[in-house]
Amino acid sequence: MKKPFFLLFALLASVLPPLHAGGLIRQIVVHCPDQDQREANDPKPIYGDRVFGQTFIPSCDKISFLRVAAAGTGLSANPGLELRLWQCAENYRNTRAALPLATVRTESPIGWARSLYFPMEAALSPEIPYYWELAAPAAPTPQTANWRLWYQYGNSRYERGAFAVNGARSGSCDAHFTTYYPVTLTDRAALAGFPEIVEVEFTAPVAPRAVKVNLSPAAAGGKSFSFWRDARRLAVLFEPVKEATEGAVTVQIAPSGQTSEGVKMNFRVIRPAGMPAVAPPAAAPVPDLTPSPLNEADSVRHLKGIVRVTASEAKMVDGKAEFQLEVRAEPIVGMQTPWKEVSLATLAKFRSNGINAVTLALPAADDKAEVYSQAKNALELLHRYGFPVYWLMPPTPAGYDKTIVDAAGDARSMAWNGKRLKDYCYNHPQVRKAFIANLEPYLRRLKADGQWLDGIILNEPSRRWGEFCYCPHCQQLFTAEYKIPMPQPLRMDAGQTAIPVEWPSGIPKANYRKPEDTAAWKQMSDFYCRPLTVRIDDIFRICRAAFPAVSCQVTTIDDIAPFYGLDFFGSIMKLKDLDGIQVAVYWAAVGARSPLAAGSEPLAGKFIKNAHDRKLTCYYWLQGYDAGDNSQPLKPGEIKVAVKAAFERNVDGILIWSYLNPILGPWNKPYGWPEYFRDFKAGITPQLERSAATEKVVLRPGEKQTLTWRSGDNGRVIFRIEAAWPGSGTAAVTGFADGYRCGRTTINLK
Ligand SMILES: [Zn+2]
């Protein structure tokens, strides 16, 4: 319903006759929740230059009240609040620049049960985004504000919008709020939700004490709160009632010296399909997921993907087993997933959207028994359902053994100015020992528990650029090796720890060094990279000792340009036995910035070629929230472009950062995981199906066949298929391809 029609509706309402001829009650309007989010873990004071808001998508065509959770200390002392409602434009600025659909200014808001209620009257269009914003312009500082607005930090409790502070949306945060829509109550009305506000309009002013409004059934506790919207309209707030399928509103008036009057109206609560009044709690779906167990023995170090084998039309013909066999070489498509979120439902969602691998951050530095066992169970579940697992790890994946590192005395790295840096100095033998002492047993324990890792990915291992270590230990080592003291930078602020450096040499920029120190700085740069290289070598060695087939990989930062400490091919780092890298350069043609802003196309081509010449696996690192360059929110369709561009540049697979991260679209086109998955699936499906072969297989009893098939895309992948049938029951097929995990299936013969 559009606005003019709604106004007409309101106008008609005011000239309606009373419910009973000559009676005092003109009409009863109930207000039911439309959009609703009632979880919160963080209060924030509201004051002048800080405004809070929430985008939401109504299911109904009107809004009559907005509830926002707030903690306050009383009504009279509060600074004025201002609430405004807009239809979302493509960005915050344009949204705010438009005329609000409603503005509510109040010195004394209706505060009840730790919530503020703002009455308003606006017509909305269902299923398009709106934005409400709450401000307290009269409160210049947080100290003078009495209201603290409650919201949910993280976990994206409301999927149809997001919380915003000063116009910056936090995709995973949500206000504790409810929008209500009005329904004029008639007897035996069918309501789409249980009312929480009952409003009675009288034909003449009545004494407040003479009126009793009741809503049944009542919530536990049965509290209510009444206020007069004007001389003839009384509104009563009730606590939410869940799961009720019917109810009644009773109004009784007993004015002194007049005949008392009462009315009771029954209603039913229905939930029309597709338009739930309140988002139903996420029911645990029964995931449709077949186990397809992986074995550690099938691990492939240069893992390009997984062979899928499926058989159909299996039958016996003249004593022979016959079936159609499809083999497919799927590229690795991995999703970064918190280990706590690894469940059958999550994996079913991944499988149905083309995601076939998972990257995890394992809690190896946490020594709580239940944390270990939950993470171990996550690994077990992933492997049982056929998902290869990569441990996406920081450069200190399991922390340090405290006893050993403490025994080393002061072993932290130190900047040129003597300031202690965050991490320990890996040149210190005790630090290295303390590092290994934690990582080794963790992996041994996983192995003893029957688990394994398919890959490890060292995430952005570069050290802080130009943050050279001047600790006494390093100074001594450096002088012993080069027979000179460590060079000192020029023109630095006393508190600045990182020296601006040139790329890729890693030596200070010209105006930060004495010209005669250039040779010494080159030695310094080399010396600085060494402990990081040693640390990565240690990690690779320890992981391979536990899991010989584990793929050892690193991610690049931002770009494939040879960053300091990460120049794999320029040999600064001298990393041995690298198995793969993740490149974040192919967000070509995606986002507002040109692909060249993120990384030059010729450089990208050279990087991939270098990686493949060195037989490294190369995955594309697809960002979840903005498809790559962190410059603009994701717009529908962009993932498809990014995925296609990446495979056109010959990557082996895609890793996505990350499941359950906030995903934002333009203000008027919210982009959440359902939309992301839909777009991603459309982009990845052609890649998953690209290299496949289908043929008929016929086996005699007791026969084993080894077949060689070429994939339909000009034989890009060569499959070796081993098919065997003992003569009764089931036939077994295994499909192999170079660089792919093998796939298996058993075929039931009738
Ligand atoms: Zn040091």
Image (cartoon, rainbow, N blue to C red):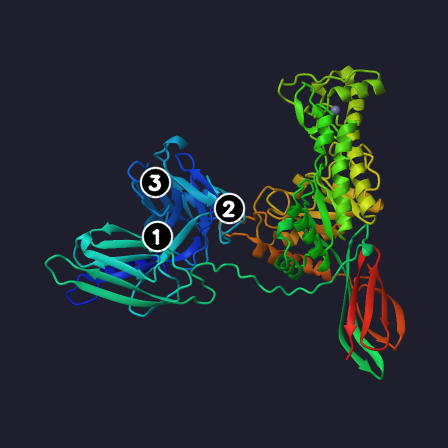
**Image quarter of residue 60:** bottom left
Relative to the observer, which residue lies in front, 156 or 402?
402
The answer to whether 63 is drawn above or below residue 78 in the figure is: below
Q: Earlier in the sequence, mark 3 or mark 1?
A: 1
The answer to whether 299 is drawn above or below residue 476 in the figure is: below
Determine the CA span between mark 3 and mark 2: 22 Å
The three-letter code of the residue at mark 3 reads: Leu
**Residue 259 appears in the picture as rendered:** yes
The three-letter code of the residue at mark 2 reads: Cys
* SS class, disc 1: strand
Q: Around disc 2, counting alpha carbons within 10 Å, would you say few (fewer than 14), some (14 to 19), or many (20 or more)?
A: many
Relative to the observer, which residue lies in front, 279 or 102?
279
Q: Position of residue 430 (x, y in %)?
A: 77, 28
- Residue on which the image places disc 2: 173
- Residue on which the image places disc 1: 65
Q: Position of residue 263 (x, y in %)?
A: 23, 65
Q: Which mark is residue 81?
A: 3
Determine the CA span between mark 3 and mark 1: 15 Å
**Position of the N terminus by quadrant:** bottom left
